[in-house]
Amino acid sequence: MATFYFDVHDVRGLHPDRIGQDLPDLDAVRTEAMHALPQIAFSIAEDGDRQSIVVIARDDQKRAVYSATLAYTGEWLTPHGATASD
């Protein structure tokens, strides 16, 4: 097992991981990064309709070993607040 750190870059800024996680290999690092993205996106959903979230995994030597990005774009298809019957 080795310790990996998952830094998050989102609309609010950089959030460095100071605790880390012990994982068995780089495949587990990839899985952890990919699973984290939707959870992070859900937590910042109120911050706007155009967002990009990046998770960068670092090893215990602080070297970046994996990066995963999730982009979100929301767009109103009717005037905001209007209903289909308006």
Image: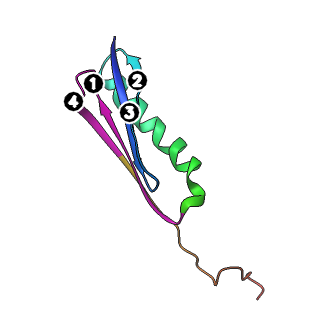
Residue drawn at (60%, 59%) of the image:
46
> According to the image, label 1 marks what residue?
59
> Range of the magenta residues?
48-68
Instruction: Quadrant for the N terminus, please.
Output: top left
Dot 2 and dot 3 residues touching (CB under 8 Å):
yes
Is 51 within the magenta?
A: yes
Q: Position of residue 12 (x, y in %)?
A: 47, 54
Residue drawn at (32%, 33%) of the image:
57
Instruction: Quadrant for the C terminus, please.
Output: bottom right
Can you tell which quarter of the image residue 47 is in? bottom right
Residue drawn at (64%, 84%) of the image:
79
Dot 1 and dot 4 residues touching (CB under 8 Å):
yes
Is 25 within the magenta?
A: no
Q: Element under label 1? A: loop
Q: Residues within 10 Å of mark 2 (few under 14, many from 20)?
A: some
Q: Element under label 2? A: loop
Q: Residues within 10 Å of mark 1 (few under 14, many from 20)?
A: some
What main secondary structure does the magenta stretch of the protein show? strand
